[in-house]
């Protein structure tokens, strides 16, 4: 089985659910505790053995590119001041030489169109796609879990989680042909089905391992929902040719592209930090108590 070496990070979306912040700040630079969303995605990819990182970016996303660049003046100052902890915190923002490639999507024509930009860099090998606004918290990275599982099944693999039936209309949902532990072999995917017609409660979230055959699907794809080129449509078209498997990852997913999901993620990650936990938890207790008293 081919080693998954490359990952595509589509970061060209407009982030309209997070306005006004995203008027000037790329959504992926919104910060959970003290790390921007993109850092969580890069860390997860590294943890899964990814060696080449491809950003599909857009105009106005300069902060995202600078974040992974050297900050010589800052680093010299921190060195001179002996601030070793602060210096060490920059370590994970350093990318190995030649490992980061930034492409531009000229117009936001959808996730499928964004992924298609990476065709010539991927060539003929399976690759990962990570949507940085889907943050997954768990003991083992979601992508690392998928890479492991993919060794046995190949084809296209999408990350799934079980959602309440009432919420299927918010997600792409798998039509499951056969389940085997964490794997669900799909007959297809349905975009945002109402609960009464949802084929399952397995929702697709923003981690994929794709066979490079996806690119000829993307090349020939017409506009889908919202007039955009949808990655879901291309994967769906490959059910018979390549095979599509849902992988039920272990972990908790937060939709950090939405304000509610982002606030919840901030709380969950802060409560996980030994240096913040106690004071923050008592602050939350106090707030919850006040809410109950008012109600
Ligand atoms: P979203 O559906 O979250 O869209 O994209 P968005 O524009 O980022 O945010 P909202 O809905 O307006 O608030 C899912 C992922 O696909 C990328 C986004 O950057 C995000 O990672 N994307 C989407 C692109 O790279 N290009 C596109 O044309 C559309």
Image: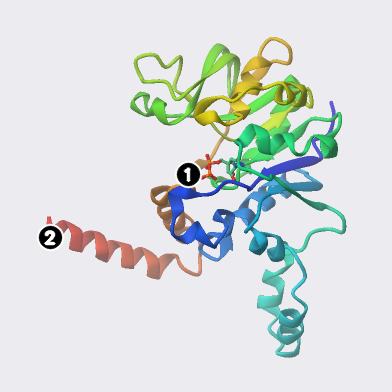
How far separated are the C-alphas under marks 1 and 2?
Answer: 30 Å
Query: Is 1 or 66 nearer to us in this picture?
Result: 66
Asked whether disc 1 touches disc 2, contact meaning CB atoms under 8 Å apart, the reply is: no
What residue is disc 2 on? Answer: 294
Where does the image place residue 143, in percent across and percent down from the top left?
Answer: 66, 39
Nearer to us of marks 1 and 2 is 1
- Judge the density around disc 1: few (<14), some (14-19), many (≥20) Cα neighbours within 10 Å: some
Mark 2 Cβ inside 8 Å of ligand 1: no
Residue 245 in sight: no
Residue 201 in sight: yes
Q: Is residue 1 left or right of residue 242?
A: right
Give the quarter of the figure containing the C terminus. bottom left
Where does the image place residue 187, in percent across and percent down from the top left?
Answer: 58, 11
Identify the element where label 2 is drawn: helix
- Judge the density around disc 2: few (<14), some (14-19), many (≥20) Cα neighbours within 10 Å: few
Residue at image location 68% in from the left, 83% down from the top: 83
Q: Is residue 95 above or below residue 11?
A: below
The quadrant in which residue 140 appears is: top right
Identify the element where label 1 is drawn: strand
What residue is disc 1 on? Answer: 255
Which quadrant of the frame does ligand 1 lie within?
Answer: top right
Mark 1 Cβ inside 8 Å of ligand 1: no
Q: Is residue 111 left or right of residue 263?
A: right
**Residue farthest bottom in this picture:** 81
Q: Earlier in the sequence, mark 1 or mark 2?
A: 1
């Amino acid at each position: 089985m081919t080693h998954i070496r490359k990952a595509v990070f589509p970061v060209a979306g407009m982030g309209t659910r997070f306005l006004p912040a995203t008027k000037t700040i790329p959504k992926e630079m919104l910060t959970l505790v003290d790390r921007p969303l993109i850092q969580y995605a890069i860390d997860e990819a590294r943890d899964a053995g990814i060696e080449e990182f491809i950003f599909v970016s857009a105009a106005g996303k300069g902060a995202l590119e600078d974040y992974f660049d050297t900050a010589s003046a800052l680093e010299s100052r921190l060195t001179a001041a002996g601030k070793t902890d602060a210096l060490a915190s920059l370590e994970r923002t350093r990318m190995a030489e030649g490992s980061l490639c930034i492409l531009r999507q000229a117009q936001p024509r959808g996730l499928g169109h964004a992924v298609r930009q990476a065709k010539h860099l991927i060539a003929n090998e399976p690759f990962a796609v990570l949507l940085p606004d889907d943050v997954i918290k768990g003991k083992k990275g979601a992508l690392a879990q998928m890479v492991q599982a993919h060794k046995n099944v190949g084809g296209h693999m999408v990350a799934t989680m079980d959602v309440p039936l009432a919420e299927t209309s918010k997600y792409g949902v798998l039509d499951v042909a056969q389940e085997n532990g964490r794997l669900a072999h799909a007959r297809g995917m349905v975009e945002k089905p109402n609960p009464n017609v949802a084929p399952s409660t397995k929702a697709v979230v923003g981690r994929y391992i794709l066979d490079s055959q996806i690119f000829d699907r993307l090349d020939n794809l017409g506009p889908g929902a919202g007039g955009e080129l949808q990655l879901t449509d291309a994967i769906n078209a490959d059910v018979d040719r390549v095979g599509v498997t849902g992988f039920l990852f272990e972990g908790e997913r937060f939709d950090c592209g939405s304000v509610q999901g982002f606030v919840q993620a901030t709380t969950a990650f802060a409560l996980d930090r030994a240096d913040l936990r106690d004071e923050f938890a008592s602050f939350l207790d106090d707030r919850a108590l006040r809410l109950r008293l008012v109600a």
